[in-house]
Structures are given as C-alpha cells and as structure tokens.
Image (cartoon, grey):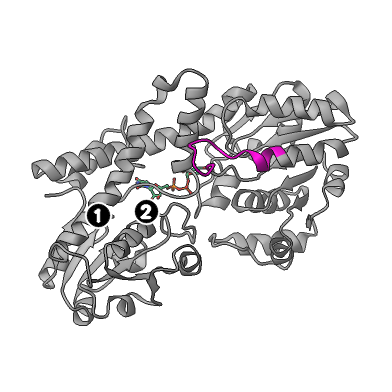
Amino acid sequence: MRLTVIGTGYLGATHAICMAVLGHEVLALDRDLDRLEALAGGRVPFHEPGLPEMLRKALDSGRLRFTDDVAEVAAFGDVHFVCTGTPQLPGSMGADLSQVEGAVTALAPHLERPCLVVGKSTVPVGTAERLAATLAALAPAGDAAGLAWNPEFLREGHAIEDTLRPSRLVLGVTSDDARERLEAAFAPLLAAGVPCVVTDLATAELVKVAANSFLATKISFINAMAEVCEASGADVHQLAAALSLDDRIGGRFLKPGLGFGGGCLPKDIRAFIHRAEELGTGHSVRFLREVDDINQRRRGRTVELVREAAGGDLRGVRVCVLGAAFKPHSDDVRDAPALDVARRLHEEGARVVVVDPQALDNARRTHPELEYAGSALEAAAGAHVVALLTEWDQFRGLDPARLGAVVERRAVVDARGALDPVAWRAAGWTHRGLGAA
Ligand code: UDX
C-alpha cells in the first residue's frame, strides 16, 4: 500500500519506519526541514533503542521517503496517518489541537482521489467527528475521503516492539471501506494474531485516554499507599510485592517512587478531566485530579527528604542528582519528575549537579540553571546528598564504596527504590527512600 505519515515526531517517525519495514511504500511529511534531513540521512533525532537500525533498513529498502510538500503527500497516499502532537495548552488543562487540526485542514483541499485519513494522535473524545466534518467540507474527493481513528499505545524505549507487536489494534471507523483500508495497512500484524477491536470513532479516541488514565491511577494508587507507609512505619516495596502476587492486581505499573512524567500520562489525564467537564461529566473522572495531586506530592516529598538529609536547609548544599530523563531508556525530559525535583532543590539554594546517560543535552536546554556532569563520580564529587531520581541501570549498579570516596557526606535519597538499602548502609551511607519510615 501507499501510506503517508504526517508529523515525524516520536510517534510519526516510529510509525513511518515500521510501516516501511513491513513492506508498505511510505512518504512521511514534516515542516521541520532539519528533522527531515536527519531522518533521510539515517539519523533518528531522539533516543530510541533499535530505531536507528530500523531506519537504515527502511531507507535501504527504498520504501521510505520524506517530504515537506503536502500536495505530494495527498497525491501519493491511499491512507494518511496523522501523527502530530497534542501538548497541553499553556494555562489550561486542555489539549492544544492546533497541529492535528492544521494537518487535516492543510491536507484536505489536496485530496482528489479516494483515500482514508487516520488520526493516531491522542485527542479529546469528539475531535474525530469534528475532523470528519472538516474533511467532508474541504476535500474535493468528498465522501471518498474518509476519516478513521487508530490510537497508538507505544511506550518510549519500547517503540518498535509496541508498533510491530502491539497488545492490540483499535480501529475506529464509520464505513466498511475504512475498516478494509486499515486492515490492509496492518495486514502483517493481524496475520501474526494481534487482537483487533473494531469500533466507532468516539470509542477509539476514548480507549487511549482511558488506558493512560488507568495506568496513571495504578501508579498513583501505590504512591498513595507509600504516603500511608511513611506515616505508619510500613514498607511500600514489600506491600507492592505482596499485592503483585494477586494476578487480578498484577505488578506492572505498581512500582512506587517519584511517580509519572513524560509527554503523555500527565497531559493526557489533565486533558481528559477538561474534556469530561466540557461534556458535563466531570464528576466521573474527578478522581483523576487526586491521581495528579498524589503524583505531584511525591515530588514535594522527595525535596523534603533531600532537605532532611542535608540537615534541614538546602542553602549552599551540594546535591548530586542521578537521572534527568522522565524514565530510563529515554532522552525525553518533558515533565520529567527528576528535573522538576532538581529545579526545586536549586530554587531552595542547593548547588545541583545532574548526570544522565542520555538526556543531558535536552536537560541543558530546558533547565540551564542546573549544573551537569558526564559521570556519576564527577557529579558526586564533594556532594552532601546524592539523590537517585531516574532508575537507570548504571545508577542501580553504582558501587556505594567508590561513590562514598568522592562525596563530602554519605547521604543518599533513593526516590525510585533502585538501591539496596542494606548494601548502602553497610558502606557507611545514611539511606532514605520514598515509601518507608
Ligand atoms: C505511556 C503509556 O505507557 C503508553 O501506552 C502511551 O502510548 C504513552 O504514555 P510512556 O510515556 O512512554 O508511555 O511511559 P511509561 O513507560 O508508561 O511510563 C510513564 C511514567 O510512569 C514514567 O515516568 C515512569 O517512571 C512512571 N512509572 C511507570 C512509575 O512511576 N511506576 C510504574 O510502575 C510505571
């Protein structure tokens, strides 16, 4: 099939590359010429394990090309996947839909032959129906240019696996033609037995926000238990381990710690609250406000633990922060809990030195007020407190004795439950963690 992908950010680039590897002819569009040049030259402009190799494979096959010309895209594709971002609107909980709406309104006037426009972006329920009306009004092909919704569930760090072997496909369609086109686009996945839910537009949009809300709720649930553990002398890690053994609950997304960040979960739950309120059903998702609040409180509690470890006052204290990315195996610092905590420590007067295996360039851009180091030993030199905020394997494996030799004081705060308290205490460290007395 001839597919196009509009937007070559995290989602669009991965989708375009994987679709070409699956055997489709793919033309990907972006207005960012530097990004197009990088991708066409075989360079992935973000960190994603395995994706550079897949990009080279796709380019070598001759089936993946890039352009900034929307008319070329319209003429080329049988199916157009819209993969543009939907960030949080500044000063609002709602989503900024301008990129998705802009993509459809730019494409529509060029659609002269039968085709399908497929939204993959995460949007408030009801957006797809509105975009279908826009398409019908603007496309010369009229009804022959259809609209469908196919939400994407990929996780950063697992993007290829999640695209080629997703847990499910969700196809929101309003016609047999749309379903058939999408089934043809995903034929190799369907043949491999990937479960597929065919539904209407609104349900497809909602599946995505409901899934992210559930995941965020699971994380905040265990972090709420961490708050109770801190007050009662219980241990949240043992509590989580015991809960996980009930397979109705399961252990995934039940990891207590500094909580969730990134470009999806935080803004998606806020946009969902906003949309539900617009629909007059705000009470149905009121609990998501608490999910967000619990998540924010973990950041505050971590700052408190570092302050306590520093003796009650952060002014002039040197803090080594291990981790900047919102999670390991990513260079993404969007709403990164680690950098939020680092910033707050800095604002309270600490001298903060951050180290991260992948995210330093991005962190330097968003948080120029902080200091950065190339290794944990360098970052820890002369530190009064070491704070582990993103659980990279490199940090889990740190030798407490070696690190202890370079710090000023052996005090560690582990906000991700990644360090063995027994080993660190044996090496002379005071160890504090979230979720324990
Ligand atoms: C998420 C969804 O998982 C994915 O399906 C959706 O398409 C996009 O949003 P992603 O943002 O890549 O993916 O990260 P994810 O692995 O879900 O982690 C989100 C955050 O939750 C991270 O900050 C992580 O550190 C935190 N987390 C995750 C926990 O604090 N505890 C857990 O048990 C799991």
| Image x and y of residue 214, in percent | 41, 33
Say which quarter of the image contains residue 46.
bottom right
Residue placed most toward the observer, 406 or 310:
310
Amino acid type at circle 2 is: Pro
Mark 2 or 1, nearer chain start: 1
Q: Which residues are magenta?
A: 88-101
Q: Is mark 2 within 8 Å of ligand 1?
A: yes
| Residue at numbered disc 2 | 337
Q: Are marks 2 and 1 in contact (CB under 8 Å)?
A: yes
| Most frequent secondary structure within the magenta stretch | loop
| Image x and y of residue 76, in percent | 86, 45
Say which quarter of the image contains residue 228.
top left
In this image, 2 relative to 182: left or right? right
* Residue 302 circle label: 1
The quarter of the rendered structure image containing the N terminus is top right
Q: What residue is rendered at 21% in x and 65% in y?
A: 314
